Image (spheres, coloured by chain):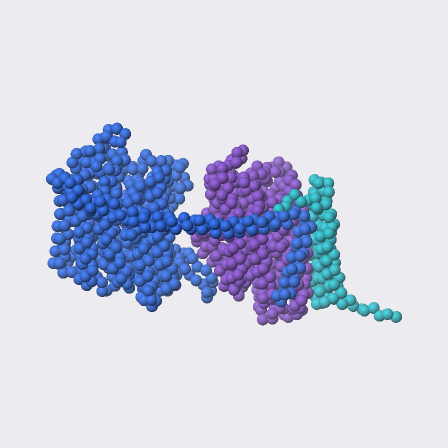
Amino acid sequence: MMNFPTTVPTEAYLILSAVLFGIGAMGVMLRKSALTMFMSVELMLNAVNLSFVAFARHFGRLDGQIIVFFVMAVAAAEVAVGLAIIVDIFRSRRSVDIDDVNWLRG
Amino acid sequence: MMFVLPTLEWWTIAPVVILTLTGCLVLVVDLFRGDDASPEPLAWLTTGGLAIAIGTSVSLWGYEAQAAFSGMVVADNYTQYFTVLFLVIVGVTVLLSFDQLTKEDFHPGEFYSLIVFSAVGMVLMASAADLIMVFVGLELLSICLYILTGFSRRRLESEEASIKYLLLGAFASGFLLYGIALVYGSTGSTNLGCVARAINPASTFAMFGCGTGSVAGAATSGLLLAGVAMLVVGLGFKAAVVPFHMWAPDVYEGAPTAITAYMSVGAKAAAFAAIVRVFMIAFPTLSHDWSMILAILAAVTMIVGNTAAVSQQSIKRMLAYSSIAHAGYILVAVVAASQVGIASLLFYTVGYTVMNLGAFMVVILLGRRSEDHLLISDYAGLSRRHPVLAGLMALFMLSLAGIPPTVGFVGKFYIFTAAVQADYAWLAVIGLLSSVISVYYYLRVVYQMYMVDPVAGVEPVTPLRWVTVAAGVAGFAVVALGVFPHGVLALASASSTFIR
Amino acid sequence: MLEQLWLVPVFPLLGAVANLAFGRQIGRTMVSLIAIGSVALSFLLGVNAVLSFMSLSAPHGFQLRLFDWISWGAGSNAVHVADIGLLLDPLSSVMVLVVAGIGLLIHMYSVGYMAEEPGYARYFVYLNLFTFSMLVLVLANNFLLMFVGWELVGLCSYLLIGFWFTRPSAAAAGKKAFITNRVGDFGVLIALFLIWVNWGTFDFFGGPGGAATGVFDDPGRVLATQGVAFAIPMLLILGVTGKSAQIPLFVWLPDAMEGPTPVSALIHAATMVTGGVYLVARAHLLYDQSPDALLTLATIGALTAFVAATVAVVQTDIKRVLAYSTVSQLGFMVLALGSGAYAAAVFHLMTHAFFKALMFLGAGSVIHGLHEQQDLRRMGGLRRYMPVTTWTFVVGWLAIIGAPGLSGFFSKDLILARTFARGLIDPVYLGLYGLALLTVGITAFYMSRMVFLAFFGDFRGGVDDHGHAVIPHESPVSMLVPLVVLAIGSVIAGWIGVPSFLTGGTSPVSAIEVFLAPAVAATGVWEGTLEHLTEIVLTGMSVMVALAGASLAGLLYLSGAVNPVALAMVFSPFTRLFEARWYLDDFYRVAIVSNVARIASFLASFDLAVIGGSVTVVVRTVRGAGSVLRASQAGYVRGYAVTMLAGAFLVLAASWAFR
């Protein structure tokens, strides 16, 4: 019978977090829909949350986990505002394609 | 089971408490008002709250630095210096926005409460003793600004500026937060003092509320370096440092002009308030790592900002690039990384605030019919239509270009002196050369006002009395601080004593 | 009351600001009230401060440091450059009283003189600003602040010379004054640099709150560096020749008469032009280190006095006679400075302020009464039409030619006596004394000529250029009161300097010298004293010479015993020389202006081709780069995000590289 490791090493969490962060960043740059871009940004924030929790567990401390609550609250506020703005954009332009939003330039 | 309640030194954040209450009060009062009610009472309410908070902050001046809320915030002269500066900026913004507020049917309750809450964010950034506090303050400021940027809902540009600012701002927050996480991972703490001690056990920043016990992790240099780099990205975005500046021109152009003025001085000053704390407290012993990076960023920022401003047609966009260039000058002071450097940064922040706000006041006075008359060519022959405004604008342009006897000159002189003392003479030279470029586009405005015949069909506007008075005061301050800089400089020196 | 000293300069400044802001709205009466009131307050406070100061025993005078002005750095590497501070000592006391007192009278006079002029408020703004600047100049407690006042008075002078800027000659005169003074200011600026390098401070005297040791606490420090002890006084002399209109830079002052006449009286006779004299008196401790610089100064002074007096002989414009006379009298003061008799120079500065201001204002009254006629040949017999103007003017005339008992008599004789005394040590000064004595005679001649031509004989200006009959009339009371006050001053101002051999005292020096001694006493060797008998002989000689000059003028212009035209024919080489102003303007035009113009046109072509060309290249490059940057800012959010990410990677890479 195979022995699963009883604990996942911290590095694994960190690598996963970095990968998620990268996926989020790629999403911001590659997707055209403002909505998807916004979701990608949230993915980046949650990737960081994973890092915080992993570090906190590594140090055996609580503060990293508490930080996550701060970040979640901030992210929630950001989502609320962001969705409102995106809805507003959709109302006036009937599209959330971010490449159409390029009047301001130069 | 026993809970030990942490001691809460409320007085250390008294201005924040007063501002928060003011913001809430504005919202509540707004509920009981009709849709067509004049915004004036709310403006007075806001101004009153700001005045009380300024008074409180002034009364906290001169006390010994005090960390509070378990090392989350610190109240010292530096905090109060920036608090007063921020709140004066907010007060001026309330004055500047009044006209547009009544004309474009902005909802006053939301507008005023948002601007007050953004001020809370700025004050928290200046008083932060912990990276998480920096993050929370910055997000509070940013979220309010996303909404304020899009406040002119009738104009599509305003909306566009808002979504661009939001997406890029959130993107940058991700980097900032990742940077904090990596610093936490490598040092075991997010408190600025503890981070410093984890990196160098000899450093003592007891006033930042890091206890005397040992800190968990030892600084792991790879993670730490990556973390610091990410912090540079996140904070550099807010300060509009090249190459994280690209949001700024678009957002500045699209936002209501009063909010543009607010962002260009307030948000930028707040970003630098945090940058100084983070880099001078948490990572002073790593300065050989980051100071060269910041020096290169400062050089690039000054060059790009000044060069791109040359080819602008819109005055708001020109001022946006100019403010990017000024972020570069201020960054030079951070690079100098000495008490003199930080004192000159504090002085320059005040000087830049006065001259840039002054310039925006004139822009607002002349762009009164909503958002037109914002091209530089619209300033043709202004000296004949509005001699006083033209004179003031010329003064602000000369000051931004750094020509004596204005505050712009003295401020640049102190910053570049500090840079030379810190063996960054090459950076001072780049700063001087790039500000030569800036003379070109600033004087273009003066040239239009005084040398070009007025365009037919541009009617004179009736200047608003109080904004004109404010512009006059700003003009006076530009010269007074240029000739007698010592008073503010003494305050700035007293505020930078936390740096050894 | 000394703590309120700072209000003395501040009041005129407030007056200027108030009239600048509201002058066009509040009407002429309010403008005059504000302007006069501010100077009157300043004068009263000045008198009060001087009285308080005299009851005080302070070795270097009273220093009032208001606040820190320029400094940088913190902690151990803090550098304190200068503060805003005032110094009241005997020297600045005299200057404050002269500036504020004469200034007050001239403000009052201007109300009548400028009554019909457009730009009334602007005029008083400039005049108040000038008063402020001059008070800053004389009250400053360090070189830098003094230089600010020095430059500000120059600016006000330029603005007021060109007050009628629509007149091309006025605009040109303003420009000439400005450019000529730049040459002098350049010298002062270099001297300031040298002072900073050698002393590390600009403060005159050390004290709490400022430098520990001021420049004058340790004047000998310059001797340590080769040449500096000579260079600093010489560079300051360059400034003196500009500001105080001495050879070689005096050419601007006669042209400055394009300004309104009260301005000529205040700025170009009584106060600003004495700035150079004040500067040397203030810095006399530096001059005492260098006998060569002193001799240069004395030579310049004596030559200027003589040359200007000869030119004045042939002038026909009443204001130009007075202008050259001013240059000549300033030459006397500079001669006194060069002889080490600083107190005598300051004394003559004060008496001259009275009688020259009096005569300028009298000339203004004449011009006013004759509808802008300034030509002496079109005057004559005015005593019948303008009695008050005439008799006050006569007082001024008697004072300047040195009639015994009047102010000019005492101060001029003091200068002559001190120069002679110096000559007993250094014979060169005896030659200068001779030249000065001759100048006294010439002065008496041209001054008498002017008075006789203008006020005596028959009226010759019955018809003006447009064929209208001219009937001279006396000026309004507001203009006559200052004349009377100044006339009284011209008589009695000299009595504080009555030589002791007349009062029977035992002191070898006069009262004014005793008063000024703490501030400007020469350090030791230079100021010789004379036997009473020698002084009496010298005084007698100068009175005789003056009497001879006046008598000759009487023969020529009063009794008509000798025909002046015939006499001029006889001495035609001289009169031509004088009329051409010793060819100095022509010399400048040929030797300097045309050469400078040639160099300038060469430089201009160089500038256009090389500098302009490279500037164009730079501008094109920057604009090209700007367009590229503009194009890169395409408006796509995703593009911005890519840039940010790339930037983040670069920062990461850099942080790895600089690790």
Residue A65 in picture, x, y percent from top left: 71, 61
* Left or right, C72 with reference to B270: left
Chain letter, purple in picture: B
Name the residue: 24% across, 37% down.
Answer: C375
Chain letter, blue in picture: C
Closest to the observer, C287 or B22: C287
Residue C134 in picture, x, y percent from top left: 33, 50
Closest to the observer, C540 or B255: C540
Name the residue: 76% across, 65% down.
Answer: A12
Q: Is residue C74 visible?
A: yes
The number of numbered badges drawn on the structure is: 0
Name the residue: 68% across, 54% down.
Answer: C642
Closest to the observer, B475 or C426: C426
Q: Is residue B247 visible?
A: no
* Left or right, B87 with reference to C448: right
Residue B98 in picture, x, y percent from top left: 56, 41
Name the residue: 38% across, 60% down.
Answer: C193
Closest to the observer, C512 or B352: B352
* Left or right, B115 with reference to C297: right
Q: Quadrant of residue C396?
A: top left
Chain letter, cyan in picture: A
Image vertical order of residue C500 relative to residue B457, above or below? below
Residue C466 in picture, x, y percent from top left: 27, 29
Residue at the extreme top of the image, as rendered: C468
* Quadrant assignment for the N terminus of chain A: bottom right
Image vertical order of residue C398 relative to residue C650, above or below? above
Q: Quadrant of residue C344?
A: bottom left
